[in-house]
Image: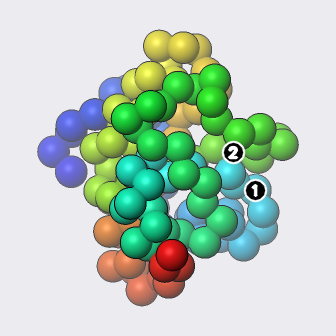
Amino acid sequence: MFGFGKSKAHREIDAQTLKAMLADGSVQLIDVREPDEFAAEHIAGAVNVPLSGFSPQNLPDAGGRTVVLQCAGGKRSGLALDHCAKAQAAVETHLAGGIGAWKAAGFPVERG
């Protein structure tokens, strides 16, 4: 939004691009929000790896898929990308606007 948590190494994708990637199976979506937020609502197929304990080494095996990080609005996923850059992990992409942008695009979320 205001450049928080963003660096030149960050690649942003929009909700439509993420939806297409989820549909074709080319993405491993990681939701870095806290467990209570994830339980309240999340994008189908997302795996919860909270920023509060985030380490690139703890990310699930993506099986050759592109890893995309996501949070509520983009700040925390940007911070997680900074952690990945410091660890030289091959994760550089997040959802611009987070789950808020996903919902604003009219896409569904799962609850519980």
Residue 89 versus residue 49: which sits nearer the camera? Answer: 49
Residue extending farthest to the left is 2
What residue type is disc 1 on?
Ser
Residue 26 numbered mark, or none: 1
Q: What crowding class fits label 2: few (fewer than 14 Cα within 10 Å), some (14-19), or many (20 or more)?
A: some
Say which element carries label 1.
loop
- x and y percent of residue 46 in the render? 60, 60
Residue at 53% x, 33% y is 92
Q: What crowding class fits label 1: few (fewer than 14 Cα within 10 Å), some (14-19), or many (20 or more)?
A: some
Sequence-wise, the earlier of marks 1 and 2 is: 1
- x and y percent of residue 50 in the render? 45, 43
Q: Is residue 87 left or right of residue 57?
A: left
Picture quadrant of residue 7: top left
Residue 76 numbered mark, or none: none
Picture quadrant of residue 18: bottom right
- x and y percent of residue 98 in the render? 37, 59
What residue type is disc 2 on?
Thr
Picture quadrant of residue 91: top right
Res 9 visible: no
- x and y percent of residue 35 in the render? 44, 54
Residue at 78% x, 63% y is 25
- Kindly indicate whether the residue at mark 2 contacts the one at mark 1 (C-beta within 8 angstroms): yes
C-alpha separation, residue under disc 1 versus residue under disc 2: 6 Å
Q: For mark 2, what is the residue?
A: 66
